[in-house]
Image: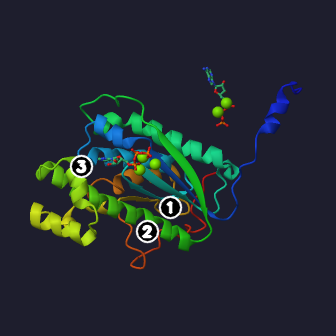
Amino acid sequence: MAKSKYEYVKEFETDDRMLRNVYVLVRIDGKGFHKFSQTHDFAKPNDVRGINLMNHAARCVMHELDDILLAFGESDEYSFLFRKSTDLYQRREAKIVSTVVSLFTSAYVYYWNDYFTDLKRPLYPPVFDGRAVLYPSEVEVKDYFAWRQADTHINNLFNTSFWALVEEGGLTPKAAEARLCGTDSKDKNEMLFTEFSTNYSKLPAMYRKGSVLLREQIPKDADKDAIIPTLPETLPGSKSAKVIPAPGLQSGPDPISEPASEAPSGQ
Ligand code: ATP
Ligand code: ATP
Ligand code: MG
Ligand code: MG
Ligand code: MG
Ligand code: MG
Ligand code: MG
């Protein structure tokens, strides 16, 4: 086919293929979810419907994109770790990030009513942003997930304390914030225990540590379609949510290693 005279505009596109042989990490985050969670009456500090819906949307992303090894979710964010060898879209950053964000967002809306059963669809379209980060080795990858999990812990301990002061203690949000100003983890744990009879360490692990989705190894000659759909049932969901052990305490197979070479890749 002859080229049109307009075709030169294609040359304005830039090459955004990411460095080869390093981990690709994509993190998405809800835009303005402080407001979104209020508008949709999320229970505070943790609305389990919201968490389960996030986990469901993340499973959809993992089903579609075979090269994602592991995903970690907390609050309105999810991180997806791609295998080092991924050649998805020839590693073009915009294609990869936009596909993850778009699929996650559409799944969030598509499955909304399965979790928020009293509301047919969200009151306005939720927005997620996304970014890709490259990590050269497992050291940075482990530290990345440790960083996100530490964030989960810090935020959740603060939010649990804040909402206890507001909802049970009758403080205004401003007063609750002032009360927590300058406190450390120990002070907050102590306050929850003595004033609100809450043993923080007994709260559901999914609230304190986030949710993890791990791709299972698929036997060499297995029928891919028959095995991959088992992923959703065995992974998050209140009780079965697997949690990343603290760094250095990992036992069993290393979740961050590349799967054995016979595992299918995303071609
Ligand atoms: P930005 O657009 O900059 O990301 P944001 O309002 O989304 O702003 P975040 O720092 O991403 O702010 O925080 C997410 C907010 O969504 C927090 O306020 C958190 O409490 C709320 N949120 C997310 N998921 C839930 C949930 N399952 N239950 C209750 N609140 C939630
Ligand atoms: P890729 O994932 O590489 O973009 P693709 O299958 O989406 O592959 P495109 O080149 O983007 O391929 O072409 C879009 C396809 O969708 C075309 O085949 C087009 O005919 C079809 N399509 C899009 N919108 C409509 C529409 N409104 N009615 C009928 N067909 C449509
Ligand atoms: Mg943000
Ligand atoms: Mg956000
Ligand atoms: Mg966030
Ligand atoms: Mg297309
Ligand atoms: Mg097209």
Quarter occupied by residue 236 = bottom left
Q: Say if mark 2 contacts mark 3, CB within 8 Å.
A: no
The picture places residue 135, in percent across and down from the top left corner, at 60, 65
Which residue is drawn at the image coordinates 67% and 52% (left, top)? 91
Residue 24 vs 113, above or below: the answer is: below
Residue pointed to by mark 1 = 218
| Front label number (2 vs 1) | 2
Badge 3: residue crowd in 10 Å (few <14, some 14–19, many ≥20): few
Query: In 3D space, how far apart are the residues under numbered discs 2 and 3 (Cα atoms)?
Result: 31 Å
Please state which amino acid type lies under the numbered disc 1: Ile
Quarter occupied by residue 115 = top left
The picture places residue 214, in percent across and down from the top left corner, at 44, 60
| Front label number (2 vs 3) | 3
Query: In 3D space, how far apart are the residues under numbered discs 3 and 1 (Cα atoms)?
Result: 52 Å
Residue 52 vs 186, above or below: the answer is: above
* Residue 174: image tag: 3
Q: Nearer the viewer, residue 68 or 133?
A: 133
Q: Secondary structure at mark 2?
A: helix
Residue pointed to by mark 2 = 146
Q: Say if mark 3 contacts mark 1, CB within 8 Å.
A: no
Q: Is the C-beta of the residue carrying label 3 under 8 Å from the nearest atom of ligand 1? A: no
| Front label number (3 vs 1) | 3
| First in sequence: mark 3 vs mark 1 | 3
